[in-house]
Amino acid sequence: MRVVLAEDLYLLREGLVRLLEAHDCTVVAAVETGPDLLDALLTHRPEVAVVDVRLPPTNTDEGLQAALTARRQVPGLPVLVLSQHVEQLYARELLADGTGGIGYLLKDRVFNADQFLDAVRRVAGGGTAMDPEVIAKLLQQPARNVPLARLTPREREVLELMAEGRSNAAIGQRLFLSESAVGKHTASIFGKLDLAPSDDDNRRVLAVLAYLNGAN
């Protein structure tokens, strides 16, 4: 798996390079600034980009904006964003184009190698990997739009795990439900969020996006 890594802290960057390369990944570029990240993404077009939100020269959202710019030029480019804190706006921006291959992970998760590598592989495979703390924070917010208010407590639990990037089988294991029961809940969520069947749109991603937008 070819990876572009963007992280301005030298020790963390080198540690991530070693971790990734020890697990069948090739880090084709490891950069520390937003402009260098954009150049690396467009040059190498990796199977996944692991990107710190805050990079020089602005140390605001330079990494995120470079990743979003690259995704506009390379549609579907898989991006896993790392952030020190939960920033709901960043999660919304990342999901805004309605395609898969995206993730939002708190940096604390990096120190759990299994969780980090699972997220990298999931995003590289075109799935989503949303940090549980991001979803937990959203769950603390009252529903502010009608479609989300239609969801039952169980459907909200299913959507929470869906937002983390879990498959129906994994959601069933977590909630002690059969896979078919999860499928029924998922279909109900799509219906209540007015997400019609489509060959072009990833309804799981669109459902998560609707959830994030409705929680703000």
Image (cartoon, rainbow, N blue to C red):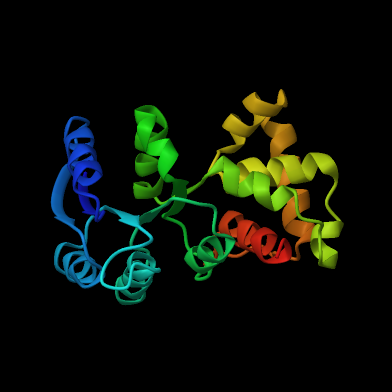
Q: How many marks?
A: 0
* Location of residue 193 with respect to 159 vertically, above or below: below
Residue occupying the point 69% across, 59% down: 211
Percent x, y of residue 196: 69, 65
* Location of residue 29 with respect to 196 vertically, above or below: above
Looking at the picture, tell me which residue is in the foreground, 203 or 4. Answer: 4
Percent x, y of residue 79: 36, 57
Residue occupying the point 74% across, 33% down: 181
Residue occupying the point 24% across, 56% down: 8
The quarter of the image holding the C terminus is bottom right
In the image, is 15 to the left or to the right of 136? left
**Residue 41 falls in which quadrant of the image?**
bottom left
Looking at the picture, tell me which residue is in the foreground, 2 or 178. Answer: 2
The quarter of the image holding the N terminus is top left
In the image, is 171 to the left or to the right of 28? right
Looking at the picture, tell me which residue is in the foreground, 143 or 166. Answer: 143
Percent x, y of residue 157: 73, 40
In the image, is 70 to the left or to the right of 134? left
Percent x, y of residue 62: 34, 70
**Residue 29 falls in which quadrant of the image?**
bottom left
